[in-house]
Image (spheres, helix red, strand yellow):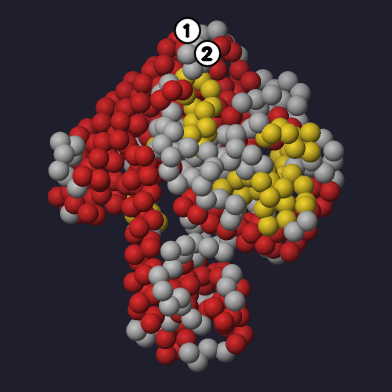
């Protein structure tokens, strides 16, 4: 945790977070005096999800997601906690940068959506063309900006040129210089009510979307594809696909096990808030499920590394995912019942 | 995952650490910074090696006159013709044509400038590719 000073002279505490969007949103709330943790924002904003978009390809590989659409956590959490945010997009990069400078001068801190490839303060191997990375600009400094990037341990300096390129990058999900900052945040938001809303929404998203590539059905769909992949695609190509799934699960700021541990942390916090033993038990179950996801990653790593010479094979990896699907289905069904008994 | 199980395998984070959620001794979730996980590195290496191999192939193709240097610089920035077209403000079909060396050679300075700006390279750099393997294809 690092102390920083904004242009308005206010102190800002940087919290190391697992995920960029929930980290930025919770920091914006904290700055307004509402102490709320990253997992809480993630749970209220219904961040956890699953989807296998086999027809959308990045570098020739289908997209697997463990969370909702980029931007949805911020939107949902803000709405459910009764906060009003001002959001802006720009056509003209110059205008977008000028307005950012103006806001910072007024002492505000501003959330920005950026392309991670152009942020050169990241280690090289994390940099790829992805237009959904969020960070907070704190103040202008010589030649750049002081930014609080929640997935890094400490605040960093970002070059002006880098930030402009990152904010106005092109490609899928173009940010168009998207920026956001709170207009009003209630002093004592009704966190309990927001939690209930978030949990109900999550249950619906995981269990009730009638398209078989989302939620629990999506997991089963993908697990079957993994099991069939070596026959269908050949060993090398199947490895590439498998590798991509695990990268989405572990590498891009998920807090471990494709956000499952972060959701378990949310359930734990909610259990204390409501004094509910049911939620506490569900949190423990979520942790156990997260551990199976980690095992899936380990088994997959062995498949890729040992080129099929070990006992680990695609059926075992797919099997683990099927176990996750079964247990998550039971968990969300129970959560759906538990949440109805909770009192806001 | 318990706090003592958070992987601290030294990998490629270049000194950065990533936040992981794990249970402490009292069974409470806390954030533990992780230096990286060896299992995860397997997959990242695979992806990095693939990008590097593709880039190297393109570099050779440029030196042998099959592709234009524009193609190399585009791939170095992990872009596709569609993304480059939007960034430079040039129609996609034209960008695709400019990937052919004989057409690229005849480009006007104004068009080259737009590519150079879009790809964050100098005008000189844009017309050439490195003579030897470029290990840090990602550099600014």
- Helix, strand, or loop for circle 1? helix
Q: Which residue is mark 1?
A: A277
Q: Which residue is mark 2?
A: A271
Lower sequence index among marks 1 and 2: 2
Query: Where in the figure is residue A307, as x and y percent of width and height?
Result: 19, 47
Task: Residue at 58% x, 61% y: name it.
Answer: A169
Say which of A197 and A263 sits in front. A263
Query: Where in the figure is residue A324, as x and y percent of width and height?
Result: 31, 28
Q: Is residue B102 above or below residue A287?
A: below
Task: Residue at 29% x, 50% y: name it.
Answer: A241
Q: Quadrant of the C terminus of chain A?
A: top right
Say which of A187 and A123 sits in front. A123
Task: Residue at 69% x, 34% y: name it.
Answer: A2
Counting labels gives 2
- Is mark 1 in CB contact (under 8 Å) with mark 2? yes
For residue A106, the mark is: none
């Amino acid at each position: 945790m690092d102390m920083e000073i904004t242009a308005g002279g206010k102190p800002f505490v940087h919290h190391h977070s697992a995920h960029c969007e929930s980290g930025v949103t919770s920091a914006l709330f904290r700055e307004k005096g509402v102490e709320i943790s990253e997992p809480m924002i993630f749970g209220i904003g219904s961040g956890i999800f699953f989807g296998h978009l086999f027809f959308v390809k990045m570098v020739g590989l289908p997209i697997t997601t463990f969370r909702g659409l980029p931007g949805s956590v911020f939107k949902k959490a803000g709405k459910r906690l009764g906060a009003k945010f001002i959001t802006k997009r720009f056509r003209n990069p110059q205008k977008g940068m000028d307005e950012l400078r103006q806001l910072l001068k007024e002492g505000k801190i501003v959330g920005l959506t950026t392309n991670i490839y152009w942020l050169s303060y990241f280690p090289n191997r994390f940099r790829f063309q992805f237009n959904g990375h969020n960070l907070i600009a704190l103040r202008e400094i010589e030649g750049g900006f002081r930014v609080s990037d929640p997935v890094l341990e400490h605040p960093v300096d970002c070059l002006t040129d880098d930030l402009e390129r990152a904010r106005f990058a092109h490609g899928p999900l173009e940010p168009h210089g998207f920026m956001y900052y709170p207009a009003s945040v209630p002093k004592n938001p009704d966190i309990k009510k927001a939690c209930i809303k978030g949990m109900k929404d999550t249950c619906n998203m995981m269990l009730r979307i009638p398209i078989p590539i989302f939620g629990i059905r999506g997991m089963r769909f993908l697990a079957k594809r993994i099991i069939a992949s070596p026959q269908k695609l050949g060993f090398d190509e199947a490895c590439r696909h498998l590798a991509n799934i695990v990268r989405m699960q572990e590498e891009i700021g998920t807090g471990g096990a494709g956000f499952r541990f972060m959701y378990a942390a949310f359930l734990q916090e909610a259990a204390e808030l409501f004094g509910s033993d049911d939620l506490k038990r569900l949190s423990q179950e979520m942790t156990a499920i997260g551990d199976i996801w980690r095992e899936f990653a380990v088994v997959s790593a062995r498949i890729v590394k040992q080129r099929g010479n070990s006992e680990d094979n695609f059926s075992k990896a797919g099997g683990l995912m099927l176990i996750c699907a079964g247990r998550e289905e039971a968990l969300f069904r129970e959560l759906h019942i538990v949440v109805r008994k909770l009192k806001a | 995952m318990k706090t003592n199980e958070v992987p601290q395998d030294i990998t490629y984070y270049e000194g950065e650490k990533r936040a992981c959620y794990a249970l402490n001794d009292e069974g409470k979730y806390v954030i533990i910074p992780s230096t990286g996980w060896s299992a995860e590195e397997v997959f990242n290496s695979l992806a990095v090696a693939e990008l590097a191999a593709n880039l190297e192939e393109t570099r050779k193709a440029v030196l042998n006159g099959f592709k234009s240097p524009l193609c190399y610089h585009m791939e170095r920035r992990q872009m596709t013709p569609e993304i480059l077209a939007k960034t430079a403000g040039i129609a996609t079909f034209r960008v695709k044509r400019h990937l052919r060396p004989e057409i690229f050679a005849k480009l006007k300075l104004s068009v080259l400038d737009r590519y150079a700006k879009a790809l964050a390279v100098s005008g000189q750099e844009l017309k050439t590719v490195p003579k030897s393997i470029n290990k840090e294809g990602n550099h600014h």
